[in-house]
Amino acid sequence: MSMWSSSSSFFYKRHSFNPNFFSSRIIKPVIGTRFVKCSSSDNANDIHELLKILPHDLRDNLVMESKKDQLLEVILDLGRLPQACFLGDSGRRYIRDTEISMEELEFAENAIGEIGGDNRGGISGTLHRISAVRSRKGVVVGLTCRVGRAVKGIVDIVRDLLEFGESILFIGRPGVGKTTVMREISRVLSDELHKRVVVVDTSNEIGGGGDIPHPAIGSARRMQVSKASMQHKVMIEAVENHMPQVIIIDEISTRAEVIACQSIAKRGVMLIGSAHGDRLENIIRNPVLSPLAGGIQSVTLGDQQAQQTDGRKSVSQRAGPPTFPFMIEIRDRHCWVIHKTERSVDALLRGKKPRVEIRKQNKEMKVIIEKCKIKN
């Protein structure tokens, strides 16, 4: 049976929707997949590797921290108090009452090793990302040390879409977990769905630091990118040289990358990508990224048609088919909004509420699907 007629998702059925219509259902976890949060045993060694680059007293403070397993990032800025951010906290907290010195920054920089031209570096064998802030003279005066984790089960929320095989773009604000999702999708598609997957990893954020990919991406192959400006070329190279069924790209942001995505999609390769943006409308209104959603064109209407649009003679319409048939807003780690791109874009351009699925994981980590119309 075609998935478009399956009852697993309301996207695959035709309905007449009432604006006030709302329903929900629960999907049991997929057999053979566990919904698990990262425990201390999962990431203890990786966290220890990150702590090694910190000043000794900060390392000791964080080792004794009760929420160490929820650590998200550590901020080291010259002449300022060091800060840490934990999952569930609304902001950062100070972790010492004395300022960071230049000697401490130099120690951390030497422990990290090479920081790339995009001011990002990693710790070999881990998923952590270190980002540098430089002075006008090029000296490192600040470091953002982000904890990278592998979270199994998180993508079971959209496993049916992965099995369907259409391209998906994940949308979300910075820090919401898009890279973690890309990493787990790499593992699920390569190990569980047995696809030929290539990860184009610009800053080694998905596959981790070093030349050997982290086990978190499963058997997916990883192509590193020497410079961020070269990402679009490596994307095309991956398709032409390595026969992937799936290409995974994190942080699509330039016109060249958008064109590369369009080219890859036309070759029949499934794309899994991510882009910064809080809502689908951010993508539509972004002149660089809007072609991923089909693009926007202005159309002049005749007199009769204008009567149906409050007298407007010019309206915006989708210019063509989207590169990504599905777009998913990650509102938070356990609440995702699923758009059928064509339908949602057309609705938004007409000033209407798009029909979507809101998928959540409850406390038992079961997936709850709610279908409704929402205001973007």
Image (tube, rainbow, N blue to C red):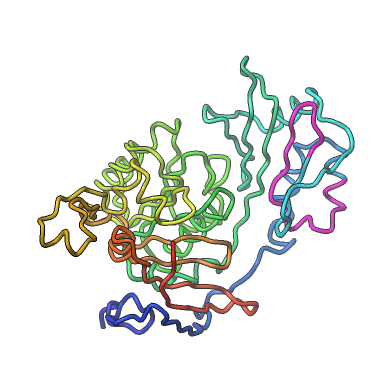
Query: Looking at the image, is 49 positioned above or below residue 181?
Result: above
Residue 256 image offset from top left, x and y in percent: 32, 36
Q: Is residue 194 left or right of residue 5?
A: right
- Residue 288 picture quarter: top left
Where is residue 208? Give x, y as percent.
56, 46
Q: Residue furthest top?
A: 137
Residue at horizontal 53 percent and vertical 51 percent from the top = 173
Residue 342 pos. (x, y %): 28, 62
Residue 372, given in percent of the width and then of the height, sits at 42, 76
Magenta region includes residue 81: yes
Q: Magenta span covers which residues?
A: 61-82
Where is the C terminus found, in terms of image quarters?
A: bottom left
Residue 252 or 329: which is nearer the viewer? 329
Q: Hey, which quadrant is residue 119 in on the image?
A: top right
Q: Is residue 78 above or below residue 129?
A: above
Q: Is residue 359 left or right of residue 61?
A: left
Q: Residue at x 30, y 41 (%)?
A: 236
| Residue 105 drawn above or below residue 64 | above
What is the count of numbered marks? 0
Asked whether residue 89 is drawn in magenta, I would say no
Q: Residue at x 44, y 65 (%)?
A: 375
The N terminus appears in which quarter of the rendering? Answer: bottom left
